[in-house]
Image (spheres, grey):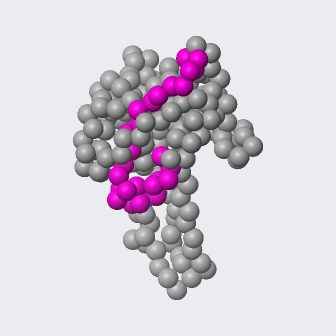
Amino acid sequence: MPEDTDFDEQGRRGWKARLGAGLAGPALAGAMLFPFLAFGEGQAVAHDHGSGDENVQAQLAEIGITLDLEVLESGAYVDRWIAGDFDAAVALNGGRPDPDGMYGRYFTSTGNLNKVAGYSSPELDKLFAEGKATSDPAARKAIYDKVSLELENNAAWIWMFTSYTYTATNSSVHGFTPMANGSLQYLRTTTVK
């Protein structure tokens, strides 16, 4: 997705203004109740978003959207998530540096997680096929920029927040490379001297 660099007075990215503007008018004439599937406490702690649901809930309340949090035990959550039985959900199941590996599984008609995504189109199928067929970085970027626009223009998903992962080492740690997807694959080659 293209990077959003505008921040509001609380330091949040500009999603609030865009979401509020996009839903303004008749859609928000009164309060809007929005069901939201969330992990139970055990899973929330494991994924470090225990207060994330409540933060999103409080921020959306500022633009007239009330999140109706349905907090489930992790097994029940996963069953509902895999079945696509939700309107909105927190899904912190990681990402991948390559856009095909990350989004192709969700937004192609044959993707193994398409039921979760709830959206595909012939245009996305075509774009993902083109992206897989080329190894030229500039051509792939142009293709996946089109994928991003297709997803944004059709509001397939609304990404409400991105959590941060912090990695700290000191000068005695060698061979460790932090990965954008949170993978710890380089621990096998890491040494401490």
User: Which residue is situated farthest in the top direction here?
Assistant: 26
Instruction: Decide which of 179, 35 is in the foreground and name it.
Output: 35
Position of 4 compared to 153: left or right? right
Magenta region, residue range: 27-53
Asked if residue 118 is positioned above or below residue 29 in the image, the reply reads: below
Instruction: Look at 71% across and 46% down and name the residue there.
Output: 10
Image quarter where the N terminus lies is top right
Q: To which quarter of the image does residue 2 belong?
A: top right
Instruction: Decide which of 159, 20 is in the foreground and name it.
Output: 20
Q: To which quarter of the image does residue 127 belong?
A: top left
Q: Position of residue 173 (x, y in %)?
A: 54, 78
Instruction: Look at 61% across and 80% down and name the residue there.
Output: 171
Q: Is residue 45 magenta?
A: yes
Q: Position of residue 96 (x, y in %)?
A: 45, 46
Instruction: Decide which of 97, 40 is in the foreground and name it.
Output: 40
Instruction: Look at 54% across and 25% down and name the residue there.
Output: 31
Asked if residue 131 is positioned above or below residue 181 in the image, the reply reads: above
Asked if residue 123 is positioned above or below residue 170 in the image, the reply reads: above
Asked if residue 27 is positioned above or below residue 8 in the image, the reply reads: above
Position of 39 compared to 159: left or right? left
Is residue 161 visible from the viewing direction of this image?
no
Instruction: Decide which of 14, 67 is in the foreground and name it.
Output: 67
Instruction: Look at 47% across and 36% down and name the residue there.
Output: 67
Q: Is residue 49 magenta?
A: yes
Q: Position of residue 48 (x, y in %)?
A: 46, 58
Is residue 186 visible from the viewing direction of this image?
yes
